[in-house]
Amino acid sequence: MAIPTLFRRLVLAQTIGAFALLLVFSSVFYVERNRVVARLTAQRWAPALRAAAGLPAGADNPPSPFTLHVRDQRPDGAIP
C-alpha cells in the first residue's frame, strides 16, 4: 500500500472536518426546529384542550393538582 501524500491527507482531514460540521449544524437545526414546532403546536391546541378540560377560555394558569412550597427562609445550618 502506498503512503498517502500530504495533499491526500489534508483533503481527507478537510473532508472529515466538513462532514463533522455538517453533522453538528444539522443536529442543532433539527433540535431547534422541533422546539419551535412543538411551541407552535402547543399554542394552537391549548384553547381546545382547555375547553375539553372544562377550564375558562382566558385561564393562563390553570389550577394545578400539585402544590409548590417556597421557603422564604433557609433551614438552620444552611450554607449561604
Image (cartoon, rainbow, N blue to C red):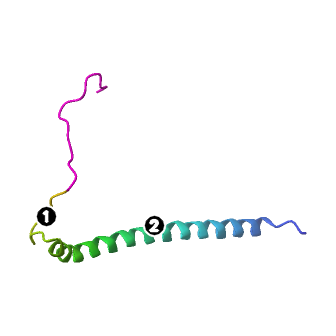
Element carrying mark 2: helix
Residue 22 location (% of width, % of height): 54, 70
Magenta range: 65-80
- Count of residue discs: 2
Which sits in the foreground, 29 or 4?
29
Q: Nearer the viewer, residue 40 or 56?
A: 56
Report the Cα–Cα distance between label 2 and label 1. Answer: 31 Å
The secondary structure that dominates the magenta segment is loop
**Residue at x 21% of width, y 46% of height:** 68
Q: What residue type is labelled 2?
A: Val
The residue pinned by badge 2 equals 28
Instruction: Identify the residue under disc 1.
Output: 60
Residue drawn 43% across and 68% down?
31
Q: Earlier in the sequence, mark 2 or mark 1?
A: 2
Q: In which quarter of the image is residue 37?
A: bottom left
Amino acid type, callout 1: Asp
Q: In this view, does 77 lie to the left or right of 25?
A: left
